[in-house]
Image (spheres, grey):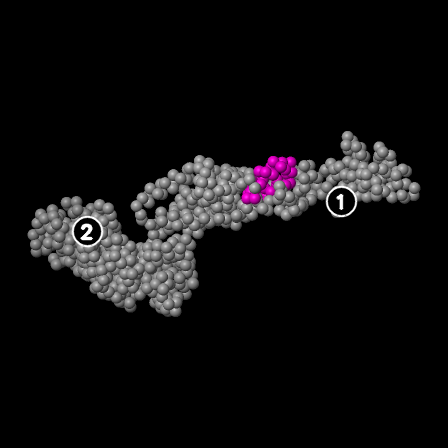
Amino acid sequence: MAGLTLRDVRKSYGDVQVMHGVDLDIEDGEFVVFVGPSGCGKSTLLRMIAGLEEISDGSVAIGERVVNDVAASKRGVAMVFQTYALYPHMTVYKNMAFGLKQAKTDPAEIKRRVDAAADILQITDYLDRSPRNLSGGQRQRVAIGRAIVRDPDVFLFDEPLSNLDAALRVQTRLEIARLHQRLNTTMIYVTHDQVEAMTLADKIVVLRDGRIEQVGSPIELYERPANAFVAQFIGSPKMNFFETADMPASAAAVLGREIGANDQVGLRPEHLTPADAGSAVIQGKLELVENLGEYALVHLATANGTEFIAKTEKPPVEALGETLSFTIKPELAHYFAKDTDLRA
Amino acid sequence: MDNIAGTKSSLTWAVHLSVVALVALWLFPTVGLLVSSFRTADQIATSGWWKSMFPSEQNLTLRTDAPETQAQIDGLYVIEGKLFEEGKDATISVWGISSRAIADFNAGDTAELRKGGTVTVQADGSYRMENAEPFEGSRGSRIFVTAETPPEFTWANYKNVLITGDATDNMTKAFFNTLTVTIPATIIPILIAAFAAYALAWMDFPGRALLIAFIVALLVVPLQLALIPLLRLHLGIGIGKGYLGVWLAHTGFGLPLAIYLLRNYMVGLPRDIIENARVDGATEFQIFTKIILPLSFPALASFAIFQFLWTWNDLLVSLVFLIDATGETTVMTKQIVELLGTRGGNWEILATSAFVSISVPLLVFFAMQKYLVRGLLAGSVK
């Protein structure tokens, strides 16, 4: 077991720099999730920790040991790939035993560890099958089992759930959460799915274009996003942004703050509540209603043309094209500077 | 909606017709060779192989027993016997005693012999010669018969070609020589190509792309171009003509395609699997032997089949690099060429030799055809 320390980690392919100096501390036993849009460098960062990509500059330390020049297999990490990466010509048992055999572990010990891992993941019945005879979920569990038997200091997951169907994804997500509780090992998990990030993580690292935008617990990121990017990335449907021109005159009074020309106001759809025109923070023309039963997503556009969404308990009774007013508790509004995108 | 994959094309009949045509094109000569190889020279001369399943009418020239076997019965000199050898079941319709009139008599008729006496021939081939005077001469009389013979097949050709035949006919030695050329000439290039293909597919080194381009360029070099320079090289460095030389030549000529096919296959293997093996602690060599090689089996098998067939059927490379004046190292293709010269009229020998020569490729093809198709498609279609 060990924590990780990343110091000014950079990666370039030729002249193109893709990681621009990442600093990150991961505590022992922490569940860390890297999120970000496609191409933000989250997988590259994970592969640099795993030893599959060279580190162009900076240092990665696992525990006290700087591992920049240590081979992948000697870093004490185990990786679970998006495509499972099972060896198709080996049985499940041999798949799980392969790493231990490479390490010249005693056969009795290999058997004990594989059986134990199979027991945890409930794949004991499949040990003699070949991967092609397993369903997607079973394959994913074998891939996780293969990581467990190596008893690594750090587990690395590279979008492990994205090849599963929705129901299985929820179930496997729970299993991974349970596994973390049980093993209490450091886990680093890459995903572009913010639901996975919010539910699994002790700590979320939001990346964009090879830079860390914000590091924090899921609730910190939701309640106090450091910039407009994080604010929009965390939360679903994503946060609405307004300029001063969008807001009615009554807004300043309700929010208790003058909206300047350099201000962006961020209001989460789930925090908007219907109100009278007099106490409106935002008003918009009704364009579309998505009724999901449990709640409704109301699509609107301000007089200024900015589109936004409100999440309401019931669909509005007004007809399309009518103007609706919404208000919000002042403490739930977020302000960002327009020029820097930083929280103001 | 007509162009959606899975709907039946209106040209299905054309596909079916061409399949039938191709099958027929392939099947006719092959079956013809096979059937002919089981027939005697007489049968081949009188009827085509497609008639071999039916009785055939043959004009045969047979001889009665020699005069010394005559017996004196009731004052007459008599020779009795059967025209056909024992066990042959033929029916004579007409016969004659002169080559100019082979159909003068019906079965059961009696004819006057020119040298005196009479002969009676029955439908089943039994005859009786009678004469008041003793028959003279050392040989029996010639009888020309037109006989209906039942279909008959014989192993004699194979016995001749494989076991008893003299040096010109015998294929056994050439068969084993061909095997001696073919097996190493298949295994050596695969071994080399598999290593090269892995390196070109998965190991990063400067100049890799250039090297791949160079190998692709080598694919289009005609081998005739290299025959003489290579032979001079072999003679110059002391390999001379012999098995080593022909193995090296086949290896060299086979390598570009082998590397190209295998690299294309290996490059399509999932990167994750290889990286996972790396995290699992496998060295580059272990990744190759434990992961890549087993997964590349279809491509390896497919190339092995190709290389085997080519080298088996090869004449040119063997002529240049292997076969010397002693003829000790002749291969089957060369042996058949020689047979065409020495035994050009003996179709039964030629057909049998040819079938011996194609039997192994046929076996290989039918045993491994699924790899042939799978390995070929593997590089292009996932």
Residue A189 percent location from the top left of the image: 26, 59
Q: Nearer the viewer, residue B131 or A130?
A: B131
**Label 2 is found on which chain of the structure?**
A
Q: Residue furthest top?
A: B100
Say the numbered circle drawn on residue B85.
1
Residue at coordinates 19% horizontally, 51% vertically from top-left?
A20
Badge 1: residue crowd in 10 Å (few <14, some 14–19, many ≥20):
few
Residue type at tag 1: Glu
Give the distance between the C-alpha atoms of the residues marked 2 and 1, in whole angstroms.
Answer: 99 Å
The residue carrying pointer 2 sits among few (fewer than 14), some (14 to 19) or many (20 or more) residues within 10 Å by Cα, namely some
In the rendered image, residue B94, in percent from the top left (x then y), is placed at 78, 36
B78 in the magenta segment: no
Q: Which residues are magenta?
A: B327-356
Q: Nearer the viewer, mark 2 or mark 1?
A: 1
Residue drawn 80% across the image and 43% down it: B82
Q: Are marks 2 and 1 on the same chain?
A: no
In what quadrant of the picture does the N terminus of chain A appear? Answer: bottom left
